[in-house]
Amino acid sequence: MKLISWNVNGIRACLQKGFEDAFRTLNADFFCLQETKAQPLQVELDLPGYRQYWYSAEKRGYSGTAIFPRHEPLAVTYGVGVEELDHEGRLITLEYPNCFIATCYTPNAQDGLKRLDHRMAWDDAFRAYLVSLDRQKPVIVCGDLNVAATAIDLKNPKTNEGNAGYSLPERESFAALLSAGFTDSFRCLYPEKVLYSWWSYRFQARAKNAGWRIDYFLVSDRIREKITQADILTDIQGSDHCPVTLEIANIA
């Protein structure tokens, strides 16, 4: 089973930058998007063989997620189930007989950490939600989680210490999520490999590879031995993020 996660930083813009070619080439069973920045009816994708599930923010041109599976799910859930956190289209969960598959766009703490309280509230609700799913059946969750977990996950950890995405509260919250029963699939296979999934549009960051690894596939600990491959596709353009991948044996 092959899954792709990609923060497209605006699906309408990404469509002008090769999204459909990348979609066909990657040929995934599940294609998960974040930061779609589109309302219903603003974009039409012709994806033969795939279902489409979209969750837009109430604010136009902001946030949003989508997931395109080959196989119809038993159920689809939108949000984390906390009313004050579910206005920005940040989480879609598909239920299948043997697992849950979710795409997430975690709120950014923003410059000066001015939205850190909201981010921490999201993280707490998100962790509790995933744990509740994991009690039922294994979970695969992907997306832009807006945190570099450790110093190896960003080019300049010292100068970014305390900034959004690398503040201590965010890193501790991510560690708590892993401790609650989840495995970072890329680090599971590659404990010391340095690859990034996001680069600022400023300062020629991508050309200099001054990036961050903030896009993830996490899986329930009890299925981590089924991970067969995890990768970060740095050659694919179209967004300030690149796609990340997971290949995992079918979950019986």
Image (cartoon, helix red, strand yellow):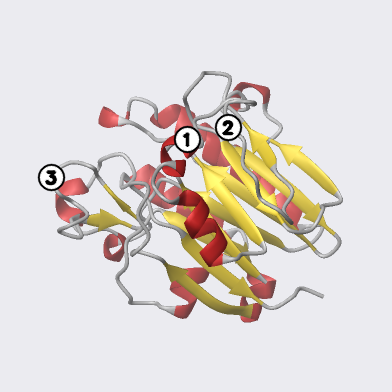
Q: Position of residue 123 (x, y in %)?
A: 53, 41
The residue lying at 64 percent from left, 26 percent from top is 41
Mark linked to residue 149: none
Q: Is residue 190 above or below residue 121?
A: below
Question: Tag 3: Cα neighbours inside 10 Å, few (<14), some, or many (≥20)?
Answer: few
The answer to whether residue 176 shows anywhere in this view is no
Q: Which residue is mark 1?
A: 12
Labels 1 and 3 touching (C-beta < 8 A):
no
Labels 2 and 1 touching (C-beta < 8 A):
yes
Label 2 to label 3, Cα distance in Å? 31 Å
Q: Is residue 193 above or below residue 120?
A: below
Identified by mark 3, the residue type is Phe
Q: Position of residue 65 (x, y in %)?
A: 58, 39
Question: Tag 2: Cα neighbours inside 10 Å, few (<14), some, or many (≥20)?
Answer: few
Q: Position of residue 50 (x, y in %)?
A: 72, 53
Q: Quadrant of the C terminus?
A: bottom right
Q: Is residue 110 above or below residue 99?
A: above
Q: Earlier in the sequence, mark 2 or mark 1?
A: 1
Label 2 to label 1, Cα distance in Å? 7 Å
Secondary structure of the residue carrying tag 1 is helix
Q: Position of residue 29 (x, y in %)?
A: 67, 64
The residue lying at 64 percent from left, 47 percent from top is 67
Count numbered badges in the picture: 3
Q: Earlier in the sequence, mark 1 or mark 3?
A: 1
Q: Earlier in the sequence, mark 2 or mark 3?
A: 2
Label 1 to label 3, Cα distance in Å? 25 Å
The residue lying at 86 percent from left, 61 percent from top is 97
Q: Which residue is mark 2?
A: 43
Q: Which residue is mark 3?
A: 203
**Nearer to me, 124 or 142:** 142
**Nearer to me, 66 or 116:** 66
Identified by mark 1, the residue type is Arg
